[in-house]
Image: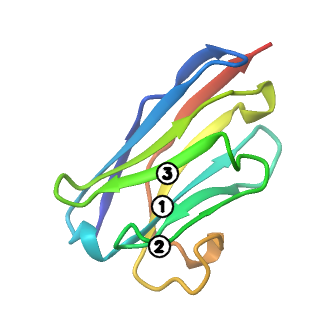
Amino acid sequence: QVQLVESGGGLVQAGGSLRLSCAASGHSFSVLDMGWFRQAPGKEREFVAAINWGGVRTRYADSVKGRFTISRNNAENMLYLRMDSLKPEDTAVYYCGGTTDSRDLSQLAEYTYWGQGTQVTVSS
């Protein structure tokens, strides 16, 4: 079993930055492909960014490409999402997810483990 705990969300003005963190425990973090997803009110949970177990391969949603950066520290069992140039449409609850069996890092259904989420609100 894997436990994931997100932190770092908050209220920020448009154009600002935030860094989300996800702490993992209970499983060998270094073998997990990891991703960030988000869910806005009334919308489906959507893919944001993902990184493979070794940190070599990353994927981003088109809507965040060039603004968000995913990274991980396997020695510390941590996943990060650096978010720059934030827009009001980035407002959502952000979740980190983990999987040991991902063919496509962006597919929600492939993720087994989830955190409880952290709220990000971007004001205009």
Q: Which residue is mark 1?
A: 97
Residue at the spot x=61%, y=38% of the render? Answer: 93
Q: Which residue is mark 2?
A: 112
Q: Which residue is mark 3?
A: 70
Of the residues under marks 2 and 3, which one precedes in the sequence? Answer: 3
**Which image quadrant for residue 120?**
top right
Residue at the spot x=59%, y=16% of the render? Answer: 11
Foreground mark, 1 or 3, reads 3
Q: Are marks 2 and 3 in contact (CB under 8 Å)?
A: no
Amino acid on which the number 1 mark rests in the picture = Gly
Residue at the spot x=52%, y=27% of the render? Answer: 18
**Which image quadrant for residue 20?**
top left
- Kindly state the secondary structure of the residue where label 2 is placed: loop
- Which numbered circle lies on residue 57? none
**Mark 3 burial class by Cα count in 10 Å: few <14, some 14-19, many 20+:** many
**Which image quadrant for residue 110?**
bottom right
Is 104 situated above or below 21?
below
- Residue 16 horizontal side relative to residue 73, left or right: right
Amino acid on which the number 3 mark rests in the picture = Ile
Foreground mark, 1 or 2, reads 1
Q: Residue 111 or 70: which is nearer the viewer?
A: 70
Q: Residue 55 or 43: which is nearer the viewer?
A: 55
Q: Are marks 1 and 2 in contact (CB under 8 Å)?
A: yes
